Amino acid sequence: MFKDRKNFFYYLGVLTPIIFLILLILIFSSLHPRFLHPLNIFNVMRQISITGLIALGMTFVIIVRGIDLSVGSLIALCGLVGAVIAKGGLVERFSVGLDTELANPWYWALAGSVLIGLLAGTLNGVCITKLKVPAFVVTLGGLSAYRGTALIVSDGGPISGFNEAYRWIGQGKIGMVPIPVIIFLVFIVLCHIVLKYTVYGRHIYSVGGNPEAARLSGININLIITSTYIITGFFVGLSAFILSARLNSSEAVAGMGYELNVIAIVVVGGTSLFGGMGSILGTIIGAMLFGVLQNGLVLLNVSSYIQQIIIGIILILAVTFDKFSKSARQV
Amino acid sequence: MEQPQYIVQMNNIYKSFNGVKALKDVSINLQKNEVVGIVGHNGAGKSTLIKILSGALHKDTGSILIENKLVEISDPKDARNMGIETIYQDLALAGNLDVASNFFLGNEKTKFFFLRNKFMKKESKRVLQELKIKIKSYSVPVDFLSGGQRQAVAIGRAIYNKAKVLIMDEPTAALGIEETRMVGDLINQLKKQDVGIFLISHDIHDVFDFCDRIAIMKNGELVDICVSDEVTKDEVVSMIIKGTK
């Protein structure tokens, strides 16, 4: 495996996140006795499931050399559209009772939320591939525009108070396992299979590795690129619904800054911003790394201001390793 | 006398980019078991010409006949389906994928939507071994392989796809002496298998070593096509520079 230095650095880049994760778990579990308690483990898992779901989609986007900065704003928009559908308008927006009667059942809210996500993803993808505007710019525009749309939809205020079936998606458990974690696990498996074992997944990697070669091999690269933004849109719609169910509320300021958390998760998980490299398993490790870090720092009473600094430093370290393994990869 | 069997006939091809004429009335043909070299300076129109044949660009006017049938080539997939395979200097392979993935790129073998990775690996190994090509490792990304090995993978892929016409764009530009010889051997092997080859090259020695005929281009026009045994290197070089016979 490590026949020469080149290969050694290559695998070092791949293995760094998991080594780091194990290290963190060892440190926190020795400093705090309850860190490894199953309740806490599932708590961490539930915390990461919302950004984690979006990170699954973002992995596809970043492998094809893209970026999606609009996901945070889109969470607010999707969640609000779902809430408006459930409430049948803005009239009953503050009816915070335990057995609130909803105008429409939760699955219509979910469908609306996901539909908006799919539409926004398609819009992002089409602008990037047809107008030839860089993904960074298109989705930066989306970051602003979707937030504005969310404010219009909600008329500025929150929409809260859903019924039990609705809230169960975000707050419920089967045995010890929270529902969001189950949803997360299902999509982890699905995305992993799609990316590793299907033609579509292979084409994603080829477009990321060498778009020109992929195009000349007869692959419709615009379709592939657009599809990754649609996938991300789908996951944003899904997790927006889960988030509103968990908080029993949707608001226009939801998901602020999530885009950066999600990108950080994907990049720390070993997906290269230069495209062509990355995996779902890496993204899961990235998500767990941030989840464990945040949870551990909270358990140890570290100020949330300092947490932000630590997270920033880790992000930069991860990209440094990424560059390392990339330059080692090229002969 | 037997009528020559042309697999490719490109007649009176014109192409311009934003008013700049890249190709002016270029006609060229190719027979089975033949290697035709295309030489000329940068901007002479060599790449434009072969990109039209490989489907990466569209011609403005003119006609293309493949095995005496008039065809329209609208994209690289079309060209592939007609048996035209192109090996680009640097663009051919995705460096992040392994040999088998590149070998079957755009043409993956599946079973119930799932990739048949083992089968694809076995097939690519078989084809490359038949061509007597040694590959260091089949499981690392091809970025880890040498330039010659990467070129061999691209050629092997073309053969596996039953290429009738092979277009090679500067196949030896990034290669050492030993690897250039290997590519030369491959070209000779392919000629014996009824393949017709267009070879684009800057290297006049390569062209004389490998080609049966040489087409000289300058400023988008075809200067002359000559049989390589009947001209000297100096004559060809002079045509490249002067643009006249």
Image (cartoon, coloured by chain):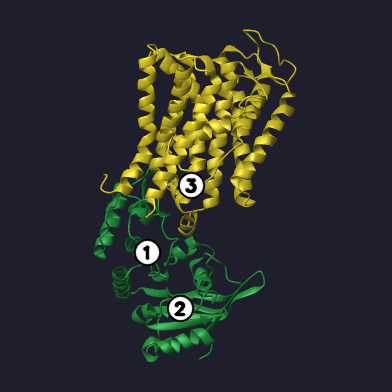
Q: Nearer the viewer, mark 2 or mark 1?
A: 2
Image quarter in which the N terminus of chain A is found = top left
| Element carrying mark 1 | helix
Q: Residue at x 48, y 50 (%)?
A: A207
A172, B161: nearer the viewer:
A172
Identify the residue under disc 2.
Answer: B38
- Chain letter behind tag 2: B
* Colour chain B is painted in: green
Q: Quadrant of residue A12?
A: top left
Q: Nearer the viewer, mark 3 or mark 1?
A: 3
Please provide percent x and percent y for residue A239: 55, 27
Q: Amino acid at mark 1?
A: Ala
Determine whether, in the image, residue A191 is placed left or right of residue A121.
left
* Colour chain A is painted in: yellow
B240, B20: nearer the viewer:
B240
Numbered-mark total: 3
Please provide percent x and percent y for residue B91: 45, 60
| Element carrying mark 2 | strand
Please provide percent x and percent y for residue A11: 33, 41
Q: Do dots 2 and 1 share one subunit?
A: yes
| Element carrying mark 3 | loop
Q: Residues within 10 Å of mark 1 (few under 14, many from 20)?
A: many
Please provide percent x and percent y for residue A289: 43, 27
Q: Nearer the viewer, mark 3 or mark 2?
A: 3
Q: Which mark is residue B158?
A: 1
Q: Do dots 3 and 2 share one subunit?
A: no
Q: Is residue A327 above or below residue A239?
A: below
A281, A319: nearer the viewer:
A319
